[in-house]
Amino acid sequence: MYEWTEEHQAIIDVVRRFVDQEVRPHLDDIEHNGVPPYEILRRMYTTFGLKEMAHENFKRQLDRKLSGDVSAGERRTGDPSAQLISTIELCRVSPGLVTSLGVSTGLAAGTINKLGTPAQMERWALDLMTLDKVGAWAITEPDSGSDALGGMRTSAKRDGDGYVLNGQKTWITNGPYADTIVLYAKLDDGSGQDLRNRKVLTFVLDKGMPGLTQSAPMRKMGQHASPTGDVFLSDVVVGRDRLLGETEEPKGGGRQSAKDNFVSERAGVAAMSLGVIEECLKISVAYAKERQLWGTPIADFQLIQLKLAHMEIDRVNVRNLVFSHIERSTHGSVPTLAEASAMKLYSAQAACRVADDAIQILGGNGYIAEYRVEQLLRDARVLRIYAGTDEMQVVAIAKDLTRS
């Protein structure tokens, strides 16, 4: 695949119209007035029939789980381009919308569908997939950002047939408003086993449970359309029905589940980056052609041309990464950890470079909010942090390449 088909372009045009009519007019409310993004996302689901599609997708996954198909959580259905097109177009104006949506319908619902029993899928996953409820995926802790699994301290102690949870999760997307929280904890069985080697269990919590506290939204540099907060657990009592798979040994559970989600997240960052890059380049080219200095459009100056050329190089490279990912996904090929991390590392850095150059080309106008490039730079910056920092991507790539 090297370009969008006519069908894909039609989807792009429709999504772009929706973004222009339903998202751009509300950006100031999201950016500066603390309005949560969920009603905008629900309007998108209604407009494009995504709620009905979610019902159909859920039924397929549930039927496979009931039939004992072990690949139920791994097989892809349909054209992956459609979802990535929505990601790209939303990221042109508000990458935070994609972050909130992806965590709720992707990470939270996806983990439940993969690890959960049919009853757990029906109890929690469908409402997340349709956006009737908001989901969070809680793994990160104050002292275990890049070492999310090894440094995890949130504990789960057996209590009869259930568990008691204690700990704190931080930087949790949708945390302040989540109705459903997929939470990872270390099993504390009283054996004194080293913390790093303890079994990782996955639970599903509901808003308002005794002992569960969700903080107010954090004040952040960017991605204001993606509310982020802390989740506190103080003697939260849960039954085995909230343990995904209702077993401490689910296939692909615990550590493997988290690692699989990291691969998915990292590959998705390339599409998010492409949206930022395309919008910043579009704004920069239009501005450079219009803005004059000493009676000459600044697009005629070589230093501006150099920036535009490098921005286009990054756009082409990231687009090719996205197209390659679509092509492979269509044929059921999953990227290796090294490949997903390489995609994430390059595309996130490219998005930040392009957004920074856009501000430089626009000068003072780029620094104020009117042209939106300052917002896109703030929003893009976290792409180099979440789903694994740049530094951790380097480690992941090297380890994956050199392991025997």
Image (tube, rainbow, N blue to C red):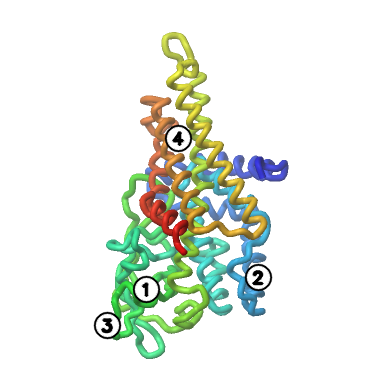
The residue to which callout 2 is attached is: 59
Secondary element under disc 3, as helix, strand or loop, is loop
Percent position (x, y) of residue 207? 41, 70
- Can residue 230 be seen here? The reply is no
Q: Nearer the viewer, mark 1 or mark 3?
A: 3
Say what amino acid the circle numbered 2 marks.
Answer: Lys
The residue to which callout 1 is attached is: 185
Say what amino acid the circle numbered 1 marks.
Answer: Ala
The residue to which callout 4 is attached is: 354
- Can residue 300 be seen here? The reply is yes
Secondary element under disc 1, as helix, strand or loop, is strand
Q: CA distance from mark 2 to mark 1?
A: 29 Å
* In-image side of 222 versus 111 (left or right): left
Q: CA distance from mark 1 to mark 4?
A: 39 Å
Most extreme residue toward the top is 295
Q: Nearer the viewer, mark 2 or mark 3?
A: 3
N-terminal of the pair, mark 3 or mark 4, is 3
- Image marks 3 and 4: residues in contact by CB distance under 8 Å: no
N-terminal of the pair, mark 1 or mark 3, is 1
Q: Nearer the viewer, mark 3 or mark 4?
A: 3
Secondary element under disc 2, as helix, strand or loop, is helix
The residue to which callout 3 is attached is: 192
Q: CA distance from mark 2 to mark 4?
A: 41 Å
Secondary element under disc 4, as helix, strand or loop, is helix
Vertical placement of residue 305 versus 30, above or below: above
Q: Nearer the viewer, mark 2 or mark 4?
A: 4
N-terminal of the pair, mark 1 or mark 4, is 1
Q: CA distance from mark 3 to mark 4?
A: 50 Å
- Residue 396 found in image quarter: bottom left
Say what amino acid the circle numbered 3 marks.
Answer: Gly
Percent position (x, y) of residue 366? 40, 29
